[in-house]
Image: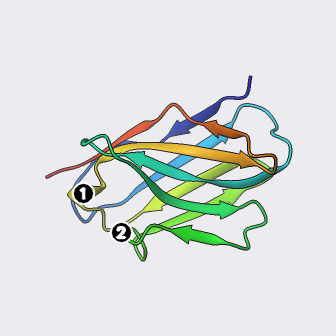
Amino acid sequence: QVQLVESGGGLVQPGGSLRLSCTASRNILRIMTMGWYRRTPGNQREFVASTTRGGGTLNYADSVKGRFVVSRDNAMLSVSLQMTNVKPEDTATYYCWFQTFDGTDYWGQGTQVTVSS
């Protein structure tokens, strides 16, 4: 069973930066898309950002554009999310996500990000 292992969450002050990383425990064939979702304290699941494995297409939620950058390392089977100028509304549990060409989804266990002074 493939596991996606996340790291990098924690407490950060408003305006600060944080980097989340996610690595697959073993090779996943035919990955199409890698990215991040988050679940807010109000229990809303939100798309955050994604990248195609080839890196040709990057997508971001409007709420994080210009502040977050998603990147991937295909050789390491990993995806990262660089968060800058974070805001209290970015507080959430962040989940990495891989999707294959046949539509299979893989999810990480979640990492908590809390933005507070």
Residue 68 position, x and y percent, is 45, 66
Label ID, residue 89: 1
User: Dot 2 lies on which element?
Assistant: loop
> The N terminus lies in which quarter of the figure?
top right
Q: Hey, which residue is sitting farthest right in the picture? A: 29
Residue 114 position, x and y percent, is 27, 45
Residue 14, relative to residue 108: is it above or below? Answer: below
Q: Hey, which residue is sitting farthest left in the picture? A: 117
Residue 76 position, x and y percent, is 75, 47
**Residue 83 falls in image quadrant:** bottom left
Label ID, residue 63: 2
Q: Residues at badges 2 and 1 in contact (C-beta under 8 Å)? A: yes
Crowding near pointer 1: few (<14 within 10 Å), some, many (20+)?
few
Look at 51% across and 31% down and name the residue there. 109
User: Dot 1 lies on which element?
Assistant: helix
Q: CA distance from mark 2 to mark 1?
A: 9 Å
Front residue of 8/65: it is 65
> Sequence-wise, which precedes: disc 2 or disc 1?
2
Residue 71, relative to residue 30: is it above or below? Answer: below
